[in-house]
Image: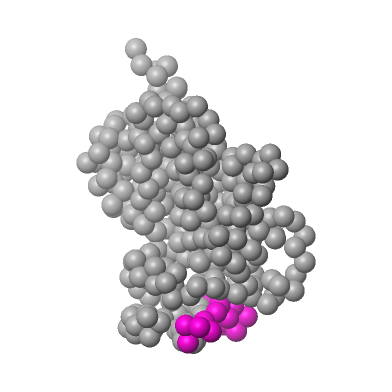
Amino acid sequence: MTGHLRERLEMRGFELESTGLGQDDSQAGIAGLNSPPRKQRERRLIKPAHDVASVVELEIIPRLVSAIRSVRTPASIDAKAATTEVDDFARLVLGGSVAEACSRVETMRSQGLSLEQIYLDLIEPAARRMGDYWKDDVCDFVAVTLGTLRLQQILHEFGLAFRGEVKPREHGHRVLLVPAPGEEASFGHLIFGAFGLVLAAEFLRRDGWDAYLGCSASGAETVGIVRREWFDVVEISLTLESHLDDLAAGIRQIRRASRNRTIGVIVSGPAFRDHPENITSVGADMSATDGRDAAIQADNLMELQRRKRP
């Protein structure tokens, strides 16, 4: 299988030596420390961007999960003391298995912590910590992609239990969660933005929303979706501030095309978490700082719209 993956990737210009995928399956690992600097890797991998996005989502991740049963944490992380529980959990997710991570979550639940607390205080911060590892060239793209995939699997494993922590609500509202225009092909979104949307969807569903994920949708695809189907709210994730102008234009297109002429727009992601002034500049209604906040703000938008009705 690894040989087939090598062939498919090499056809698209991928360099396998930096990922460790050229090794035998039984010895495959993530050689993060042997990888070239991240900027050099991006120059190699980003052409063409849309092709890379589809390959990562449809081919790389499923084949990596099948081919690599155990990915070792890079040595530079092993050498760092786990100064916080978030550090320790991030290292576990990067170097261990989904079962081990789920066992850690179960232990915390047995100590009286709710899944909401664990999601907000451990799992989401762990995703951000892995982002720091990638930005600092401690881990390579493949290692962190696998780590965020494991986090998504953990959310799936505890999905029913998470929704069971609160009294069920059914109000029929629908929300679409998508990346900002141009973000669907970026490494930042593929690794982190998509996870943020998945986590937000979990909180929204628990709050009674019909949540639809379009983590790989382009700006044009998003416009087509809201033109065909009714949504009360759209949440758009942005990781790169360089795409703010594209997002502003995209929001205008969404509002013009939407079947719901009063559709609410929530923005989320690092571009707004650290710079709230960007919210008004792109024409959004509100921003969400985390998954729980996404559900709260979506409900707030519905209440505001209800009050505006004659």
- In the figure, residue 99 lies in which quadrant? bottom right
Determine the residue located farthest toward the left in the rendered image.
Answer: 228
**Residue visible at 34% across and 82% down?**
4
Q: Nearer the viewer, residue 203 or 249?
A: 203
On the rendered structure, is 289 left or right of 261?
A: right
**Residue visible at 55% across and 79% down?**
29
Q: Nearer the viewer, residue 155 or 54?
A: 155
**How many callouts does the rendering have?**
0
Q: Is residue 256 above or below residue 77?
A: above
Point out residue 79 in the picture as x, y percentages from the top left corner: 74, 74
**Residue visible at 27% across and 35% down?**
230
**Residue visible at 50% across and 66% down?**
145
- In the figure, residue 232 lies in which quadrant? top left
Point out residue 5 in the picture as x, y percentages from the top left corner: 37, 80
Determine the residue located farthest toward the top in the rendered image.
Answer: 310
Residue 224 magenta-drawn?
no
Point out residue 197 in the picture as x, y percentages from the top left corner: 46, 48
Residue 32 appearing in the image? yes
Residue 271 appearing in the image? no
> From the image, which quarter does the C terminus lie in?
top left
Q: Is residue 197 above or below residue 22?
A: above
On the rendered structure, is 218 left or right of 75?
A: left
- In the figure, residue 173 lies in which quadrant? top left
Q: Nearer the viewer, residue 272 or 167?
A: 167
Magenta region, residue range: 24-39
Residue 27 magenta-drawn?
yes
